[in-house]
Amino acid sequence: MARGQDASGWRFWMLEVNKIDVFHGGLQALWEVSLNVDEGEIVSLIGANGAGKSTIVETIASLLAPTSGDIRFEGVRLDREPAHKVVTLGVCLIPEERGLFPGMSVLENLELGAFTPASRKVREISFKLVYELFPVLEARKNQISGTLSGGEQQMVAIARALMSKPKLLMCDEPSQGLAPIIVKNIFEVIKRINESGVGILLVEQNVRAALGLAKRAYVIENGRVTAQGESKRLLADERVREAYLGTG
Amino acid sequence: MYELYAQTFVNGINVGALYGLAAVGLSLTFGVMKILNIAHGEFLMVGGFFAYWLFTLLGLDPFLSLPLIALALFLLGAIFYKLVFASVARFHEEVKVKNSLLVGFGLFLVFPQIARGLWTADERAITPAYSGTSFPIFGVRVAYVPLAGLIVTVVVILALHFFLTRTYFGKSVRGTSENWKAAKLMGINVDRTYMITFGLGTALAGLAGVLVALAQSVTPDVGMEWTIKALIVVVLAGIGSIGGAFFAGLILGIVEAVGAIFMGPYSVALGLVIFLLILMFRPQGLFGKG
């Protein structure tokens, strides 16, 4: 069974975002945005710079609060929980520009990834897993993370998020500022993480790569969901091709 | 001549250790929370008076009162954080620094008044039987009280360093100081971390206050003087450098003491000269990261 069920037998998605409005100060950034992610699914949010993609994942992570609408994860209202509680429920965001603790070592960054009590208990196992995924991080565990290359920093960001044992991993622009060959590696790692059963919500400007990886996608324009569906269908869509792939 | 300089040097170290301890707490709160607590010296003053109370009313030795004062000032700091600083901490950095200055100045106006009511405006000092005693070494007299104060300072700073680098909670404090948003995303309760950090800062101020009341004296108006000393030391050391604050405190103490040989009471201005020179030529401080 892909989807959960509540007591009354109503089927729900792992993550349900239901008609949220979000404001930045006095400016409205999102209008009635709804989206769903299922267990073990890769879903992508695509759209231009400033369309509101980051706002969506930051709101799910409870860094921002919606003024209306609701967000549920496995039936629990995320929009009523503070950001640090959202992690304990199994939702972890890798923020834009990675959000490392740049003056701290790789090891310390990873340790803080396993800050929640449940993940701290199993951190030795998690260390093994992430070092298997990124052997370079084990070799550099005592290096100050701010001195790593961009690609290695992104690896630390992903590894740190995995230390929290997420059921849903949200990646905000993991390809930002990285060379194409490294982007390819990062995307492969995301795929491997997904294959281990973790749901992925991927924010990407690199539309072709995102649609190649994700089964489904949502197109975000000016704070609204303007298209959604299977990646294959979106790739064939005239409007999407013209707007984001430069091939009319 | 040697004796004069050597003795002055030792005296400078004694005073400098107090500067260092007073500065560590300010450095911690500013480094972690980007809140500049102008009332830091007020908490130092309160710590000194509390220890004075414990000594005169209950006959408690000031060194034994240190843990009690630390606990009391931690709680006082945590309460004041919740009451007045928590609302400031929510703003973004620039507004936060400005508003925390205003709040701190407010407390600076209120605390001395309350202290005058509780303890009168008289100068108070803690004078146990052993105060004023000293022993000679290499032609220099070393007093027991400042020496013990120096040891307390070193132990406290090492303990703080250990806490920040070796414990999970300490690491979360450092993480919060580097990137509070990312800290939240890792499940760190940033508001609680801020409250505890602020409490630690005031506890450190309280400990310094006990040593000040013991080695020198406290009055209700002594707070701002110590805030300024601590600020000079923090700038000299570089923000957030805990061990650096200790050494910068020693430097300031020694410079002031040796300067007094040539300049008399005007040597106090040397600290402000250092402050300006550092801001002009090495704004990241002596031990700060460029």
Image (cartoon, coloured by chain):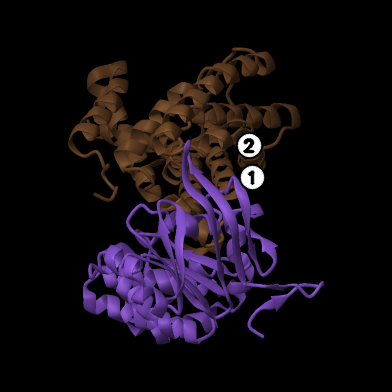
Chain colours: A purple, B brown
Alpha carbons under labels 2 and 1: distance apart: 23 Å
Secondary structure category for the residue under label 2: helix
Disc on res. B129: none
Residue receiving disc 1: B67
Q: Chain of mark 2?
A: B
* Residue plotted at (62% across, 26% down): B49
**Please, is residue B44 above or below residue B169 in the view?**
above
Q: Nearer the viewer, mark 2 or mark 1?
A: 2
Is residue B263 found left or right of B135 in the rendered image? left
Residue receiving disc 2: B82
Q: Which residue type carries mark 2?
A: Lys
Q: Residue A48: percent from the left, percent from the top?
A: 33, 58
Q: Residue furthest right?
A: A8
* Residue plotted at (48% across, 41% down): B29
Is residue B35 found left or right of A242 in the rendered image? right
Q: Chain of mark 1?
A: B
Considering only order in the chain, which callout, 1 or 2, is on the residue closer to the N terminus? 1
Q: Residue A119: percent from the left, percent from the top?
A: 59, 73
Q: Nearer the viewer, residue A125 or A238?
A: A238
Q: Residue A113: percent from the left, percent from the top?
A: 50, 68
* Visible residue check, residue B172: no
Q: Which residue type carries mark 1?
A: Pro
Secondary structure category for the residue under label 1: helix
**Please, is residue B274 above or below residue A139 in the view?**
above
**Mark 1 surroundings within 10 Å by alpha-carbon count, few (fewer than 14), some (14 through 19), many (20 or more):** some
**Mark 2 surroundings within 10 Å by alpha-carbon count, few (fewer than 14), some (14 through 19), many (20 or more):** some
Indicate the quadrant containing the N terminus of chain B: top left, top right, bottom left or bottom right. Answer: top left
